[in-house]
Image (tube, helix red, strand yellow):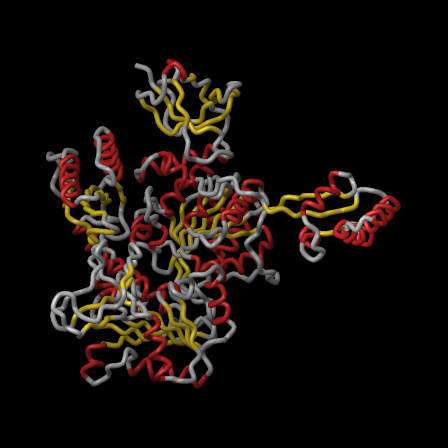
């Protein structure tokens, strides 16, 4: 049977959206595989070009007489391009989706974007000829030409922007003079550099014994040809960032390059500035606020060896470094390291695989490691490093857990407990700073009728509408908007009100209680524009506000020495989410929030306000006891077969029709059930849970269903995924029907 290969040609120059089909010669059929590198005849002249196989099939999409044969399989060495293709192939196998989707993930900035150009206009004739031409232009009243020649005779050369701007000489006039050979326009192409701050150089800080031991161990293993994956567990304020910087310096000294992953854009500013002070313009940043041109240029700078260190969120993993030696992953427990779009890869696992392709080390850092990382460290898969002391020599902050039920019983209806109000007042008197954090993860405000309880819902999504300040009701999933409701559409009652708990409300109540307080707010609304994170954090660091109010983005990784009080409002909202990671997330958020206080010479205090003070996640977070939390949480995971004790595959079905979506989900669940080995003991047997409507059953008029497959072996779940993909591919599915896979999902909502 004739076999065909879909091939993307010359991937570093072409858009990754068009494969070309080739016939596979007989002698290549056994060895060619998806992701392989080939030489293929291309274009009218059949020029041999390098390409990459995205699919192998026995179906010919074109006239077989016009299909060309592949020339050969490329086996010479492994370049950066080949490694990225291998990585894309691994992502496709491990997380599902198509090879094209994996390639677009791995090569996100390969669209040809016009490079930044610097142009200069200079005189191309002798001074005497220039003076003669100037006189001729004046006689002919060619004023624009005369202005340009006069300035060029004085300066010799001028920036193009100045000529067209200040001198008001049009490009057409410049082209005319250039055509006559009078002037020459010199064009130099440059890479855009998103690092605008000219930071002062910073001398290397001396390391503590624990920090030095961590650096020495990682570099000794690397020098001995035994790089690995390390879990650096350090309490808040123990100096993890300084360890990262020293490891990066040592790696760069060995001629290798470094990727520094951070969970959110909000962390970029402080982290980038510390690296920039050590590495100068050899460090750059990659994040979603950059323009397409800036992103493209950072990838090109990395490929050409112009930078040694790149800092960014999970997409920074795919910067094409040819000599990668180290991947640093700060706050590795963060959920934002998991992609929400297909392929739903996790940056931690992807970083470990990428490091094996380069012979590089991986360092995962956190004060509150994910259960997965801690589990693997205890199993010996990751090598463990500890930082147990705060660099300031101070102790961890004093934590007060306030029972809001008791506050209410004693007549306090404010969103601030009496303890928090007292401590805020003390900080304002002393001129010290405070941070107020509202734990809104998994929570949104809603509008309801106080008579019949009817909740205003989006007609296109299975979610409640949120009330904005202008009174409009908005769906945060599809963007649907409607004016505020005056009467209940169900019972006609006028008693309609919103239930809100947000940063705006905290800011308003704070000003009511302390009229002179200076407040900065950091949430999704105040950080929409480019550089807004940096501006807010820089203003707070400069002492322009007494209190920083925000969501979880303010409690991660920031270092403000003058902050001596942290208040956690609604600490247990995330415990109410129906998800197996709820306890872990709450513990991590509370521990991280508490860690922002007392990082300078002054001792810190933390107030945790909660309705569930007895919950183990709150108790262990208040005590900063990671070991105690892990031991309790892992028992629950092992008993229920949840990650990391086992693996779980979420099979997500999307359909325009509720009936079709439900029927397809049931068919797929039955297919998955065929992989269950009934002869295995029940504790080790694959388990199918569902199907059922997803937690949010409809978004933008598309119905969503899900079922879960649990098994101790990740490879067996990959078999299930492959089987379901094949089954779907053999059938004609209705439009707007799709299938997605999520391995070890970060949430089950």
Q: Residue at x 30, y 14 (%)?
A: 1
553 vs 456, left or right, is right
From what the image shows, is residue 406 above or below residue 555?
below
Q: Is residue 385 visible?
A: no
Residue closest to the eye, 699 or 645? 699
From what the image shows, is residue 552 above or below residue 104?
below
Q: Position of residue 269 (x, y in %)?
A: 49, 61
Q: Is residue 185 visible?
A: yes
Q: Position of residue 629 (x, y in %)?
A: 26, 61
123 vs 89, left or right, is right
Q: Position of residue 586 (x, y in %)?
A: 28, 63
Q: Position of residue 521 (x, y in %)?
A: 40, 71
567 vs 272, left or right, is left
* Res. 398 image quadrant: bottom left
Q: Residue at x 24, y 51 (%)?
A: 699
Residue closest to the eye, 657 or 705? 657
* Res. 88 image quadrant: top left
Q: Residue furthest right?
A: 128
From what the image shows, is residue 296 above or below residue 273?
above
633 vs 66, left or right, is left
Q: Residue at x 33, y 54 (%)?
A: 335
Residue closest to the eye, 660 or 150? 150
């Amino acid at each position: 049977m004739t076999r065909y290969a879909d091939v993307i040609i010359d991937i570093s120059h072409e858009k990754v959206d068009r494969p070309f089909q080739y016939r596979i010669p007989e002698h290549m059929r056994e060895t060619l595989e998806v992701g392989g590198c080939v030489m293929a005849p291309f274009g009218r002249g059949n020029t041999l070009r390098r390409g990459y196989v995205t699919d192998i099939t026995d179906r010919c999409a074109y006239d077989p007489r016009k299909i060309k044969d592949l020339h050969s399989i490329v086996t010479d060495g492994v370049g950066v391009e080949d490694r990225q293709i291998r990585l894309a192939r691994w992502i496709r196998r491990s997380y599902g989706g198509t090879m094209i989707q994996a390639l677009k993930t791995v090569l996100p900035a390969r669209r040809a974007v016009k490079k930044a150009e610097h142009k200069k206009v200079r005189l191309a004739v002798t001074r005497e000829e220039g003076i003669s031409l100037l006189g001729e232009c004046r006689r002919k009243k060619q004023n624009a030409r005369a202005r340009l020649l006069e300035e060029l005779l004085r300066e010799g050369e001028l920036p193009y922007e100045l000529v067209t701007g200040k001198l008001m000489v049009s490009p057409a006039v410049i082209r005319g003079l250039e055509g006559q050979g009078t002037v020459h326009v010199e064009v130099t192409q440059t890479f855009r550099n998103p690092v605008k701050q000219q930071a002062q150089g910073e001398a290397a800080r001396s390391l503590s014994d624990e920090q030095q031991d961590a650096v020495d161990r990682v570099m000794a293993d690397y020098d001995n040809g035994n790089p690995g994956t390390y879990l650096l567990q350090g309490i808040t304020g123990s100096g993890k960032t300084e360890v990262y910087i020293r490891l990066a310096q040592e790696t760069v000294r060995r001629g290798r390059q470094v990727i520094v992953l951070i969970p959110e854009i909000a962390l970029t500013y402080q982290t980038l500035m510390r690296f920039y002070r050590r590495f100068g313009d050899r460090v750059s940043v990659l994040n979603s606020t950059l323009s397409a041109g800036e992103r493209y240029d950072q990838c090109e700078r990395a490929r050409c060896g112009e930078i040694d260190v790149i800092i960014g969120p999970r997409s920074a993993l795919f910067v094409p470094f040819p000599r990668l030696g180290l991947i640093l992953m700060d706050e590795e427990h963060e959920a934002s390291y998991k992609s929400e779009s297909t392929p739903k890869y996790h940056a931690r696992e992807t970083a470990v695989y990428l490091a094996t392709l380069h012979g590089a080390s991986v360092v995962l850092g956190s004060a509150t490691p994910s259960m997965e990382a801690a589990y693997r460290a205890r199993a010996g898969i990751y090598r463990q490093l500890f930082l147990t002391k705060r660099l300031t020599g101070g102790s961890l902050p004093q934590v007060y857990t306030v029972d809001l039920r008791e506050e209410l019983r004693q007549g306090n209806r404010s969103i601030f407990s009496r303890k928090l109000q007292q401590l805020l007042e003390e900080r304002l008197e002393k001129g010290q700073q405070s941070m107020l954090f509202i734990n809104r993860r998994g929570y949104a405000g809603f509008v309801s009728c106080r008579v019949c309880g009817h909740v205003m819902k989006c007609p296109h999504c299975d979610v409640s509408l949120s009330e904005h300040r202008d009174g409009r009701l908005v769906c945060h999933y599809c963007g649907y908007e409607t004016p505020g409701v005056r009467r209940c559409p169900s019972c006609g009652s006028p008693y309609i009100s919103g239930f809100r708990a947000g940063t705006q409300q905290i800011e308003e109540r704070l000003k009511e209680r302390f009229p002179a307080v200076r407040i900065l707010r950091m949430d999704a609304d105040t950080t929409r524009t480019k550089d807004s994170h940096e501006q807010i954090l820089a203003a707070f660091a400069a002492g322009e506000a007494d209190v920083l109010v925000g969501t979880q983005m303010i409690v991660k990784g920031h270092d403000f020495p003058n902050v001596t009080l942290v208040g956690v409002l609604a600490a247990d909202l995330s415990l109410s989410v129906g998800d197996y990671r709820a306890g872990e997330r709450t513990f991590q958020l509370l521990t991280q929030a508490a860690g922002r206080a007392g990082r300078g010479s002054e001792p810190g205090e933390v107030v945790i306000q909660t309705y569930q003070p007895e919950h183990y996640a709150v108790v262990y977070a208040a005590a900063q006891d990671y070991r105690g939390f892990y031991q309790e949480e892992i028992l629950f995971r092992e008993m229920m077969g949840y990650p990391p004790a086992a693996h779980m595959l979420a099979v997500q079905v999307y359909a325009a029709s509720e009936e079709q979506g439900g029927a397809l989900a049931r068919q797929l669940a039955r297919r998955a059930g065929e992989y269950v080995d009934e002869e295995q003991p029940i504790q080790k047997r694959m388990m199918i849970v569902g199907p059922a409507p997803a937690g949010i059953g409809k978004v933008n008029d598309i119905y969503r269903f899900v079922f879960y497959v649990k098994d101790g072996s990740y490879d067996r779940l990959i078999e299930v995924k492959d089987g379901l993909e094949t089954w779907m591919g053999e059938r004609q599915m209705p439009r707007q029907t799709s299938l997605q896979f999520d391995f070890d999902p970060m949430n089950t909502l």
